[in-house]
Amino acid sequence: MAAATPASVAEDPLIKVERLNYAYGDHQVLFDVDLNMRSEDVTALIGPSGCGKSTLLRAINRINDLVDSARVVSGRITVDGVDLYAPEVDVVRLRRNVGMVFQKYNPFPRSIFENAVYGLRVAGIKNRHDLEEAAERSLKAAALWDEVKDRLHETATSLSGGQQQRLCIARAIALQPRILLMDEPCAALDPVATVRIEELIFQLRGQYTFVIVTHNMEQAKRIADRTAFFCKGRLVEVDDTMTLFNRPRDPLTESYVTGRLT
């Protein structure tokens, strides 16, 4: 691991969160968050339930726009210097570039093939050859191709939970996004399926910039280059993962990573 850096600093950040204050109606959930995330890193967001980490994740691809009361109070989030909340930003295009995988695997009630190419169809791609190539490419990238190549027209819900989650990852990466957001992607999976997802993240690191919310601190240690600790809507500390867990600077971080704060 690289040497520890100051709490809000990361070299060559792709994603920059700057003095972000975020609320649902009158209820503020994020306070003055400054966080830089480097290109092609795996950044883990950890902290107690309700600390704002999932809100931040969902703000990065503006999926919180679907919640009427959600709003940026002040501050901004940029990707490559572009303010994601500027009026001219095309939200559909943004979400193609910033994929999302949720806690509960959510394949559509369609075939495995149609799940894999769903985003491409929405984007207007109709050529069968192009769709077949994209399905194979994304399913291979999600380490699922060998398990499903002979059953592509079976319903996605016939797959195991771990396979369904990998299918959701394939669906996200079929659009070839630059960033992948994951909101507790292993929370609904058994230990064996969890290992497969973590192995997949290792295989894909360097191809995508990952931001992952997890309550599993051992998972953060295993997969993340950097880890950010949140508490009560505030970013307490961010550092290289092993530095944060082994030599936290803030007593609150130490209490959390040692299990005294839950």
Image (cartoon, helix red, strand yellow):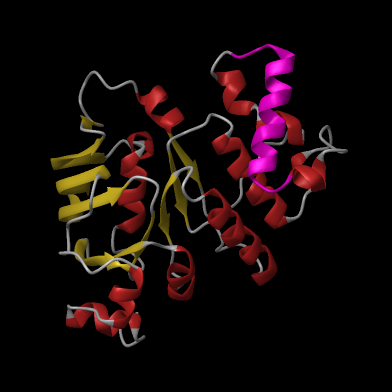
Q: Provide the residue span drawn in magenta.
A: 125-144
> Residue 91's spot in the image, x, y percent?
35, 25
Residue 25: tell me if it is visible. no
Q: Where 202 falls versus 168 (above or below)?
A: below
Residue with the most extreme right position: 150
Residue toward you, 196 or 2 = 2
Residue 211 included in the magenta stretch of the image: no
Quarter that holds the C terminus: bottom left
- Which corner quadrant of the image does residue 72 belong to? top left
Q: Is residue 139 left or right of residue 65?
A: right
> Residue 110's spot in the image, x, y percent?
74, 33
Number of disc labels: 0
Residue at horizontal 73 percent and vertical 16 percent from the top? 129
Residue with the most extreme front position: 2
Q: Is residue 158 left or right of residue 131?
A: right
Residue at horizontal 29 percent and vertical 50 percent from the top? 37
> Residue 179's spot in the image, x, y percent?
42, 40
- Which corner quadrant of the image does residue 229 belong to? bottom left
> Residue 148's spot in the image, x, y percent?
81, 43
Residue toward you, 199 or 154 = 199
Q: Where 130 falls versus 176 (above or below)?
A: above
Quarter that holds the N terminus: bottom left
Residue at horizontal 69 percent and vertical 21 percent from the top? 131
Residue at horizontal 19 percent and vertical 64 percent from the top? 5
Residue toward you, 129 or 88 = 129
Give the main secondary structure of the magenta stretch.
helix
- Which corner quadrant of the image does residue 61 belong to? top left
Residue 127 included in the magenta stretch of the image: yes
Q: Where 204 falls versus 109 (above or below)?
A: below
Q: Where 79 falls versus 103 (above or below)?
A: above
Residue 218: tell me if it is visible. yes
Residue toward you, 234 or 15 = 15
